[in-house]
Amino acid sequence: MAKRSKARTIGELKASGYISVSIRQEMRRNLLAMIKARKEVFPGIVGYDDTVLPEIENAIISGQDIIFLGERGQAKSRIMRLLVNLLDEEIPVIKGCEINDNPFKPVCKQCRDIVAEMGDNTEIDWLPRGERYGEKLATPDIAINDLIGDVDPIKVAEGRYLSDELTIHYGLIPRTNRGIFCINELPDLTERLQVGLFNLMEERDIQIRGYHIRLPLDVFLVASANPEDYTNRGRIITPLKDRYGAQVRTHYPTTIEDEMTIVEAERRKFGGDECEYYLPQYMKEIIAEITQLARQSPDINQRSGVSVRVSIANTETILSNAIRRAVIEGEKLAVPRISDLPYIRTSTAGKIELESFEDTKEDKVIDDLIKKAVMNVFGRYYRVHLLEDIVGQFDGGFSVEASDSMSAKSYVRNVKEIIGLADAVKVVNDSERPEAIASAVEFILEGLHVNKRLNKSKVEGKTVYRR
Ligand SMILES: [Zn+2]
């Protein structure tokens, strides 16, 4: 189909048969069309298919404004931005209008005057959907003029009619007219501003510097908040709370698989390294398990939460330590091992808040999480009693050294020396590469240690496993 040239005036727009609808109708119509066509509405959002996403879709089909309640790092911002996909590719607006006026129904004084004068010859523009989204992080210092608008005292002094909209400097929300506006951390707005917001949403009029101004905006409002702030008495004025049609509770990934899928999609990837890398499945699981355990830990502040970003940063860290080792040792393949795990302290520490304030405790908390995670993941692959033959060979003083700075070769030697170890390695590793074997050997030795089958001690920076 040949692309028709777009209408450039109100007259041409009318002649094209264009029908203008409200933002709610537009989002609802496009959502239902996407659902019918089996199109993915929120691409890249993992683990919400049965919980969060149907609730959002119901809210949109109902035309309800949405408030997302959830701890940090639960993809709230990303979902809010993806709502833009539910808008038309572009919509017509009156050219030069600050608040994206509908050519068929102008709101601002300037546009009403132009249309009265020019009629069907009034020029229009086409606004792409990417420009119909606005967001603001609520802080106590945001004022009415930022969000809603201000009147120009000079023009008022000149004797203009007091509610004449010509004197308004529009704030962020009017500038997102016919779009989606999102307020992050809603409870941090001052009560005065909450009242202003409520009036704008409900009464379609606002009071600025004591002047009543009618402003029938067409905005889809979305907000986010930490659940505790939101339910705290007094943090949000009741009428505003009532006004949000849908409360959608977000959550962290409920399964290790979802956690790992997000990590794989989100972690930073660099090309062009000389060495390749390989991230064994059990190492991915250990990282995800650490995060999931952290979300249940009484030592960690659960109100601020433990984001998937912890898993992402930790994966990047162990991979980087493996790459660093490979470059030092001149190895061609970088494979993270158990002995790389202590380095995640640096990438975990800033992202969790401890319940107590002792700095020294932080390392201990993280070390305990690592130990527990190794234990859980090891238990998914091995039955310890089936490894007794390996353990037995440590009787009589035999020991094995391991370290994040040791080359892979010495681990391969262990596999030859210890009867049964090669078979145990095969459970988690099918690669012949020494670097991959080294990682699997460490996993098994550490697994035997956390299950109290082997002792572990630190000698000159190296870990020694023995009976
Ligand atoms: Zn206008």
Image (cartoon, rainbow, N blue to C red):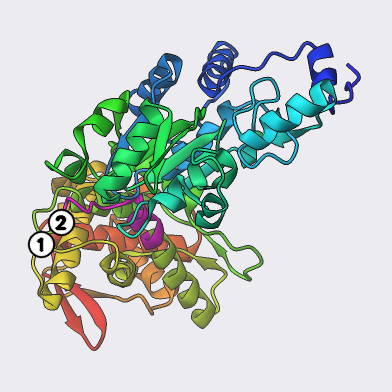
- Can you see residue 256? no
- Assess whether mark 2 and mark 1 are in contact (beta carbons under 8 angstroms): yes
| Left or right of 327, for residue 370 | left
In this figure, what is the number of numbered marks? 2
Q: Residue at x 43, y 44 (%)?
A: 77
* Displayed-image quarter of ligand 1: top right
Q: Is-magenta flag for residue 305? A: yes
Please state the horizontal and vertical placement of residue 284, each as a whole percent of the image: 37, 51
Q: Report the span colored magenta.
A: 302-314
- Residue that label 2 marks: 301
Please state the horizontal and vertical placement of residue 291, each as a whole percent of the image: 26, 52
Of residue 318 and residue 143, the one placed in the foreground of this image is 143
Q: What amino acid is at disc 2?
A: Asn
In the rendered image, which quarter is residue 400 located in? bottom left
Q: Which residue is drawn at 16% across and 68% down?
A: 394
Q: In which quarter of the image is the N terminus?
A: top right
Q: Which residue is drawn at 53% across and 13% down?
A: 32
Q: Which residue is drawn at 26% across and 68% down?
A: 349
SS class, disc 1 = loop
Please state the horizontal and vertical placement of residue 255, each as a whole percent of the image: 30, 37
Q: Quadrant of the C terminus?
A: bottom left
| Left or right of 223, for residue 215 | right
Mark found first going from the N terminus, 1 or 2: 2
| Left or right of 119, for residue 292 | left
In the image, which disc is placed on residue 115?
none
Please state the horizontal and vertical placement of residue 374, each as a whole percent of the image: 23, 55
In the rendered image, which quarter is residue 111 located in? top right
Q: Is-magenta flag for residue 169? A: no
Q: What amino acid is at disc 1?
A: Glu
- Residue that label 1 marks: 355
SS class, disc 2 = loop
